[in-house]
Each structure stands twice: as structure tokens, then as C-alpha cells.
Amino acid sequence: MAKFSVSLKARLLLQDRGKLLLLKQTKPNGGNYSLVGGTIERKEFAMQTLIRESWEEAGIELSEDDLELVHVLHKRSSKEHRIVLYFRAYHYEGNPESKELQKFENVEWWSLKELPRNLTSTVRHVLKAYNAGLIYSHLRK
């Protein structure tokens, strides 16, 4: 049987007045728009990851009560399975700003009706599934 690794990630759909918070990657990191989030560390649960990553990446504070699981993505390649848990939040504290300037040049609010063309393909896929009311979707890398 072939061996493969499994990674767990958590991402945030932070919404405010019909807009979605996106991170603009630096050019060396792709230059696209993505969501706050990251890898779930060994001693964390998914919500703890989002609380930590939200502060580290965007300077915002969340609590577990702010977060609601809204989508699960299973992404697969020949060597890896990646499970990504997407949580939605409407409430946060702080002023969003890029705190990891080597990875993200900016933090921006975008209308859910007019998202940037250079949104990552994974985020575009997830938003389409989420807007269709799907709790689960999958992709091949």
C-alpha cells in the first residue's frame, strides 16, 4: 500500500457588511489573494489555530464563540491528503493589518459579489461550494 501524508488546516471566512477579509500575498509567495489561516499544530484544535493565525497574520482577535464551521475541503495529490476546515465569523476585535509582511503585503476587504480575479483557485472553489450550501467538497492537486 502506498504511503502518503495527511495535513490538517483551518481557514477563516471573516465577513463584515457583505465583504470578505482577504490577504494579498507578496509576489514571491504567488501574489494572489487568500484567506487567513494555517496548519493546525500538534497541540491545537482548529479553532485555536484560527485564533492564533488571525492575530499573527492580520492583527485581529477572535474567540471560539465567534467561529462556526461552514465547509470542509478534502484536497488530494499523489503524495498527500489535505483536510481544510473553513470557519465563518462575523465578529472580531482590532483593525485588520498585515503582520507578516514577508508573506502578505496587505489585508483587504472585498465585496462577496466582486472578488479579485487573482483569488487563489482553492479559495474560489471553496467560496463557490459554500455559496451553494455545500458543507463538503474535494479537489485534486
Image (spheres, helix red, strand yellow):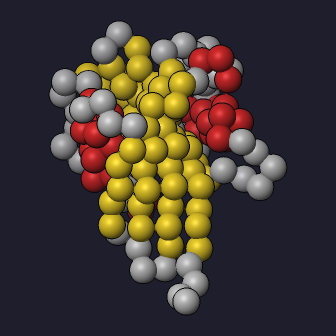
Indicate the quadrant containing the C terminus: top left, top right, bottom left or bottom right.
Answer: bottom left
- Pick the residue in front: 10 or 28: 10
Left or right position of 127 against 45: left
Q: Where 29 sits versus 95, above or below?
A: below
Q: Where 97 sits versus 129, above or below?
A: above
Indicate the quadrant containing the N terminus: top left, top right, bottom left or bottom right.
Answer: bottom right
Q: Where 64 sits versus 130, above or below?
A: above
Q: Is residue 30 visible?
A: yes
Q: Is residue 52 visible?
A: no
Quarter holding residue 8: bottom right
Tell me which residue sits at (41%, 73%) in the image: 77
- Pick the residue in front: 84 or 107: 84
Number of dots carrying numbers: 0
Residue furthest toward the right?
Answer: 43
Residue furthest toward the bottom?
Answer: 1
x and y percent of residue 139 in the render?
Answer: 33, 60
x and y percent of residue 137 in the render?
Answer: 35, 49
- Pick the residue in front: 37 or 80: 80
Tell me which residue sits at (50%, 50%) in the image: 84
- Pick the residue in front: 9 or 61: 9
Tell me which residue sits at (43%, 56%) in the image: 74
x and y percent of residue 37 in the render?
Answer: 55, 42
Residue furthest toward the front?
Answer: 1
Quarter holding residue 4: bottom right
x and y percent of residue 6 in the render?
Answer: 58, 67
Tell me which residue sits at (33%, 43%) in the image: 126
